[in-house]
Each structure stands twice: as C-alpha cells, then as structure tokens.
Amino acid sequence: QVQLVESGGGLVQPGGSLRLSCTASGFTLDTYAIGWFRQAPEKTREGVAYISAHGVSTYYGGTEYADSVKGRFTISRDRAKNTVYLQMSSLKPEDTAVYYCATVDELLLPVGSWGQGTQVTVSS
C-alpha cells in the first residue's frame, strides 16, 4: 500500500510563505498523480493542488489548482528526492488547515488511506 508522509507545516503570519513536502518510502512517486488536500476545523476536506504522474499527459495539463489558491500555491516534483512539494505564498488566515497529500485517480479523487497530515496555521 502506498504510504505518504507530509511535513513542513507551521505557524506563519498572513502574507507569509511555507513549503510543504510529501515523501514516500519504498516506491517512486513519479508513477503517481499526487494531490494536496486540506481540512479546516469543522469543514470537509478539499483538494487544493494536483500534479500528474511524470510524463503522463492529462486533460488538466499537468497541474491543477483550486480557485482559492490559484496564483498563490505551486505544486511541483523533485524526482531526485522522490518528493512532491506545495509552495504556499501570500498565505491567508483561511488557509489554516491540516494539509494532506495523497495519490489521486484520473478524476483527481484521492486513493488509499490518509496520512497524519501537517498543520498549517496562518495567524498574526
């Protein structure tokens, strides 16, 4: 079973930046489309960013973002480090949530179990 581990969360002031990491052991992330999701208190989990499997053409052109994060978040891969990143900039208090990564299917729906996630808190 694919096991992913999230890291990089923390406390940041509004307007600040953070970079989250999604790593895996024992398998290559390249072969999977990956999504970042978040869940704020008392809200349902939502997808924020997606990246296709390496070298795979998709209807969404390789990356996809929720409207709420477009222009502020960037998802990317480092193949050498077997890691998928979520670079978050211009953070807002409403970005506060636990962030998770997961493999996703062709409909960008998460597949498999969730990890522990990483807490992001945006507050002054």
Image (tube, rainbow, N blue to C red):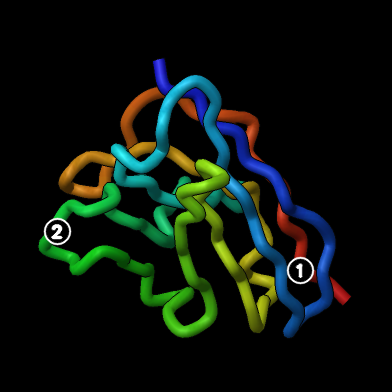
Distance CA(mark 1)–CA(mark 2): 33 Å
- Name the residue located 52 percent from the left edge and 47 percent from the top edge: 80
Farthest residue toward the top?
1
47 lies above or below 12: above
Label 1 environment density (alpha carbons within 10 Å; few <14, some 14–19, many ≥20): many
Q: Are marks 1 and 2 in contact (CB under 8 Å)?
A: no
User: For mark 1, what is the residue?
Assistant: 122
Q: Amino acid at mark 1?
A: Val
Choose mark 1 or mark 2, whichever is in front. Answer: 2
16 lies above or below 102: below
Image position, residue 52 (x, y; %): 28, 53
Quarter the N terminus occupies? top left
Tag count: 2
Image position, residue 114 (x, y; %): 50, 29
Q: Nearer the viewer, residue 28 or 94?
A: 28
Q: Nearer the viewer, residue 110 or 33?
A: 33
User: Would you say 52 lies left or right of 61 here?
Assistant: right
Label 2 environment density (alpha carbons within 10 Å; few <14, some 14–19, many ≥20): few
User: Would you say 15 lies left or right of 45 here?
Assistant: right
Q: Nearer the viewer, residue 42 or 92?
A: 92
6 lies above or below 41: above
Please tell me in which quadrant of the rendered image residue 113 appears: top left
Q: Amino acid at mark 2?
A: Thr
Quarter the C terminus occupies? bottom right
User: For mark 2, what is the residue?
Assistant: 58
- Name the residue located 36 percent from the left edge and 69 percent from the top edge: 65
User: Would you say 84 lies left or right of 57 here?
Assistant: right
SS category of the residue bearing label 2: loop
